[in-house]
Amino acid sequence: MHISRLNLKNFRNYESVEVDFSPRVNFIMGSNGSGKTNILEAISVLANIKSFRNISDHDMVKWKSSSYYTSAEVMENVVKKFEIGFSFENDRSRKKVKIDDIEIKKASNYYGKFLVVIISPEDINIINNGPEGRRHFFNSVISKIDQEYFEKLGEFKKTVINRNNLLKQLRERKINDAGQLEPWDLIFAEKAAYITEKRRNFIDNFKNTFILNYRHIASDDNAPDIKYVNTLGVFDKEAILKKLKERRTKDVLLGNCGKGPHRDDFLLENSDGIHFINYASQGQKRTAAISLKISECDIIGKTLGKEAIILVDDIFSELDEKRRKGMIKLLSRENQVIFTMVNMNLIGNDIINGSKRYEINNNYIHSL
């Protein structure tokens, strides 16, 4: 899978841009603030229906414009066209998503069709921040390779919202019948059993790939293990239902579901069970974050038999020479790779040879 052509209109700092990419290695260069990352952001919007920067659609519209449009021609045996348009007028916004001119109404029918993995400096937050960021990362990876997981996860999130609303009403004594929780407990237990089992099976395979990639980047370091922490402590539907009933009084006092897949974590730790974040240097954390993303590429390839497009956003300045060389070696693969950087001083000739290069000046992108 690779992008052959990208088209942007009124997206970020670009009024109109069209880029033809090489199916292998591409470099986009420009000074800080020139809009390099905006190109990758547009691709991430096309792949995931939202920005990898967690920016709203309104904020991606070019100044003094009321809409943006992005499209990509993606080669995968045949050419597929992906399009996303967003507009707002009179405080009303509208977003359209299309594949080959057919509008897609359900996110589950779109997500995972355009496979992109983004490696950026912000990935270190997967390591540094709390469980929510790690859950988001692993949910995203599993959803790309398993449409049913994506759908069940969405259903589970709605169940949690409905159950929480009832718990708050019980806490505030707006209702007195706790029996109203029963149907939501049943749905919660069914979805939670599916999600936790999928996560447990997935992490057993993923962590071995992760450890290998970590060692390739930093051969002298001991790679951390990844452990799935199931807060309910059980995986079977009936056992989960029992746990919910045991916790009911606590959940009512909290006004929310205190444990479950929405509270679980994926912990990185050493062989002694010490959390990675408590002993790792910045370089080790950066290595772990990059290894997670490269492992995502590998899992997609092994599971789906497809090569995800890799976007690398100005990451090399964050690494020492040894880790930089290790990462470049890992990225010398069949995947299409699109790098952004200020200049190519930190890149070796092995990966530069045969690449396509672009430079951004005054909101225009030029082929070199």
Image (tube, rainbow, N blue to C red):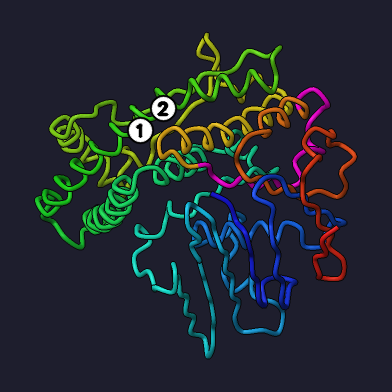
Quick one: SS at disc 1?
A: helix
Q: Nearer the viewer, residue 272 or 22?
A: 22
Quick one: SS at disc 2?
A: helix
Residue 311 on the magenta segment: yes
Q: Amino acid at mark 1?
A: Arg
- 66 in relation to 325, above or below: below
Label of residue 203 in the image: 2
- 80 in relation to 354, above or below: below
Whole-percent x, y for residue 201 in the image: 33, 27
Residue 316 on the magenta segment: yes
Left/right of residue 253 with respect to residue 356 in the rendered view:
left
Query: Which region of the structure is painted magenta?
Result: 307-323
Left/right of residue 221 with respect to residue 292 in the rendered view:
right
Left/right of residue 337 with respect to residue 183 in the rendered view:
right
- 304 in relation to 161, above or below: above
Q: Do the CB atoms of the residues marked 2 and 1 lie less than 8 Å apart?
A: yes
Q: Quadrant of residue 42?
A: bottom right
Can you name the residue that lies furthest to the right here? 345
Quadrant where the image shows the C terminus: bottom right
Residue at 55% over, 14% down:
270
- Circle 1 residue: 199
Q: Nearer the viewer, residue 164 or 40?
A: 40
Q: Amino acid at mark 2?
A: Ile
Q: Quadrant of residue 28?
A: bottom right
Residue at 25% over, 47% down:
252
Residue at 70% over, 69% down:
18
> Marks 2/1: CA distance?
6 Å
Can you name the residue that lies furthest to the bottom here? 90
Residue at 69% over, 49% down:
338
